[in-house]
Amino acid sequence: MRRFLPLTLLLLAACGERESGTDGSESDFASRVGTASTQASSAIETAAAIPSKAVKGPPPEGANIFAPEKLGDIGGVNLGPRAGGCTFVANGTELLIAAAPADRALPGKGVVRIGGKLIELDTPPGGIEAVKAGTSFRGEGFTVAVRPTGPGKGTMTITNGAGQSKATAGDYVCA
């Protein structure tokens, strides 16, 4: 019984902290760590404003296609029927997600984020095997080619409509 007494006291103290006027909200936490609640609210609103649906179309005007951004929330992205998928990650940041059906006669899809916008990309027919082996993804005004360079490794090359390109090495992991 004596072994449990310190644990019980600790738990009661923790419960007492909960009753000390903190409500556990983001605003409350922000005020306790010295960040204004308006900053916390604006960060939450900004995160909510980033679209999670991929759209077909060009990147936003003025966006740098050679600087893809972290995919972020892709919960609303529809990659269609798929037998598997692949992700390209550079420096710990997911830059591309792709999937395709098993049927080699069907194309796959990919998604990148450029200029804050999720952009849907298409692959030629070849199914998931083509995506795993490395393929080109077409967007409006640019292409993204991914080529495996070793187990779990790859290169992602973005080429604009003028033929200029930039390659990035990273991890290309497929399941």
Image: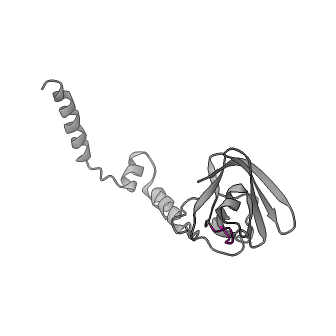
Horizontal and vertical percent position of residue 106: 67, 72
Give the residue drawn at x 19%, y 38%. Answer: 12
Q: Nearer the viewer, residue 31 or 84?
A: 84
Quadrant of the drawing holding the C terminus: bottom right
Secondary structure of the magenta portion, mostly?
A: loop
Would you say residue 65 is visible in this rendering? no
State the colouring used for the structure image.
Answer: one colour
Horizontal and vertical percent position of residue 80: 58, 71
71 to the left or right of 37: right
Q: Nearer the viewer, residue 6 or 46?
A: 6
- Tell whether position 23 is magenta: no
Give the residue drawn at x 66%, y 46%. Answer: 152
Quadrant of the drawing holding the N terminus: top left
Horizontal and vertical percent position of residue 92: 62, 46
> Which corner quadrant of the image does residue 123 belong to?
bottom right
Rendered position, 4 above or below 150:
above
Q: In the current view of this chain or complex, which residue is farthest to the top?
A: 2
Q: Nearer the viewer, residue 22 or 44?
A: 44
Q: Which residues are magenta?
A: 103-108
Rendered position, 6 above or below 42:
above
Rendered position, 65 above or below 57:
above
Q: Nearer the viewer, residue 68 or 131?
A: 131
> Which corner quadrant of the image does residue 7 belong to?
top left
Give the residue drawn at x 58%, y 60%. Answer: 84
- The total of numbered circles placed on residues is 0
Horizontal and vertical percent position of residue 45: 49, 64
